[in-house]
Amino acid sequence: MPTAFPSPVPTIPTTPLTAQLRDAMRAIVGEKGFIEDEHGMQPFITDWRGLLFGRAGAVVRPGSTEEVSKVVRLCHEHGVAIVPQGGNTGLMGGATPWPAHTGIVLSLGRMNRVLDVDPVGYAMTVEAGCVLETLQETASRHDRFLPLSLGAQGSCMIGGNLSTNAGGVQVLRYGNARNLVLGLEVVLPNGDVWNGLRALKKDNTGYDLKHLFMGAEGTLGIITKAVLKLWPAPKDVCTAWLAVRDPRAALEILSEAHAASEDNVGSCELLSRAAVDLVMRHIPGVQDPLKADTPWYLLLEWSSSRPRQDGADGMSEKLEAFLADQFEAGRVLDAVIAQTVSQSRNMWRIREAMAEAARAEGPGISYDVSVAISRIPEFIDKGLKAVLDILPSIRPYPLGHIGDGNLHFSFMGPIGMDQQTLNQYTAAITRAVNDLITSMGGSISAEHGIGIEKLDELSHYRSKTELDIMRTIKRALDPQNIMNPGKVLRV
Ligand SMILES: Cc1cc2nc3c(=O)[nH]c(=O)nc-3n(C[C@H](O)[C@H](O)[C@H](O)COP(=O)(O)OP(=O)(O)OC[C@H]3O[C@@H](n4cnc5c(N)ncnc54)[C@H](O)[C@@H]3O)c2cc1C
């Protein structure tokens, strides 16, 4: 199989798993928690996109924090490398071991218990291997809301979400994963357990350690439990699909929507026509909400935790009046408001099936970037020009969480071009996109992280001071570099 790991390969520990170590791990996690046959390991060593094919000595699946701690301590004592893994839906290769990896993949999937739900205190304590959608449903059963929401929610796990500081479609209102956490439990690279599982809103006792581990992509330790914040469950939700004049109009609509909705904008997603067409081509059963063939669309959702009151305007009446004004102002060209849950789901399916559709279409490149919200239109114009100058037949399909200043600046390869040929242009395109976003004060990674894919981009764009601080932290916690080596930083 062809594989797309960047070169040069970083230095990683390659201590092999001896027969004694295998026996010792099996004794800790039991037979069902230890996989060492090639076939069984395949899903754990291949990335979601099917681009990276790594290797491992074994996949270890502990069932408790104690087991994680014992396995990590054993690895620490023998210098064996560990790749922590949740749902393996990350798009940057962070959960995929390098082909030179001889250590273990430590999968959190068996640690999937909800330990406590506190509806009065708006908090929930969970194990790291809980699937995000299961947690959303658990919160909902208690009339509460866990706002983290993304296309992979049926398989990604909360430990992975926190380790990537995931974003998704509700960041605009609730913040990213980092903002949804009160406390954490983490197994450190030497096997010690840090119990920071506090449900405190206020806690100014020195450095806030939980923020070290969130967004660290498993390079500093293994998140085993978390206390998550909850919100009141939405009771009145209205979803609309808008054909908009251009990205500038989309931003103006969002800017006006905050006040018009009485601060109830939940989501605001920008999609290009090419992105919508991609989904229409590959995802069965999805309907185009508007027949209008315009270049830009906005998926706008307003939601309130206040139930609709008889006789009073709810979200849909307010949104309808707002859209009429925006139509008058020339920003909205056409619009439809979902009248049923299934119409709303269809609109969301278009947005959330994008990665799946792109994977089905063939070779492509995608940049997950952010910039000050008001500069998004400028970035789109300049970025498209820069990329098309390099490869005129490339097919752009930009989309993004416009309310977060986060674009998925995405391209399908020219029709008929294979991945290997496209790869010949990737370095130049990456440099052009990342130089532009950096010159505009933006970030080369908004929500997907660094993983393997952006390893060298991070060191290219972050200052020496920042990299030195990151390396100092990494070396202090993981002097042997056994915890997800060769990810985020070259140490
Ligand atoms: C269809 C689709 C849509 C997506 N949409 C979004 C989106 O809108 N927003 C977004 O931000 N992302 C999105 N993603 C990317 C991905 O779903 C997120 O990055 C998600 O948070 C990863 O969770 P996971 O459990 O799959 O983690 P994994 O892929 O298993 O791991 C991700 C990283 O975290 C580390 N890790 C995993 N678990 C732990 C743990 N318990 N402790 C320490 N380290 C750990 C891994 O080593 C790796 O570096 C999408 C992906 C897909 C496939």
Image (cartoon, grey):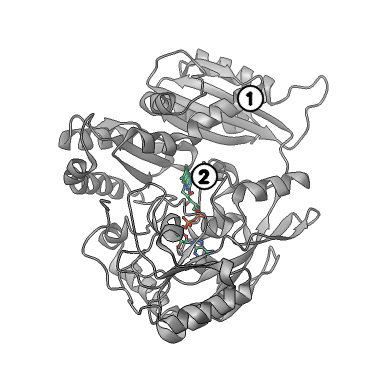
Q: Is mark 2 within 8 Å of ligand 1?
A: yes
Q: Position of residue 484 (x, y in %)?
A: 41, 69
Callout 1 environment at 10 Å: few (<14), some (14 to 19), or many (20+)?
Answer: few
Q: Quadrant of the C terminus?
A: bottom left
- In the rendered structure, the answer to whether residue 437 lies left or right of residue 428 reads right
Residue bearing the label numbered 2:
152
- In the rendered structure, the answer to whether residue 160 lies left or right of residue 450 reads right
Which residue is outermost to the right?
310
Residue 423 picture quarter: top left
Q: Position of residue 466 (x, y in %)?
A: 35, 67
Q: Is mark 1 within 8 Å of ligand 1?
A: no
Residue 209 picture quarter: bottom right
| Of residues 445 and 112, the one drawn nearer to the viewer in this rendering | 112
Q: Position of residue 188 (x, y in %)?
A: 52, 77
Instruction: Choose the circle earlier in sequence order: 1 or 2.
Output: 2
The residue that appears at 56% across and 80% down in the rendered structure is 70
Q: Is residue 237 above or below residue 71?
A: above
Check disc 2 and report its element: helix, strand or loop.
loop
The residue that appears at 41% across and 55% down in the rendered structure is 449
Check disc 1 and report its element: helix, strand or loop.
helix
| Of residues 50 and 315, the one drawn nearer to the viewer in this rendering | 50
Residue bearing the label numbered 1:
342
Q: Are the two marked residues, 1 and 2, in contact with CB atoms closer than 8 angstroms? A: no
Q: Is residue 176 above or below residue 256?
A: below
Q: Position of residue 297 (x, y in %)?
A: 45, 24
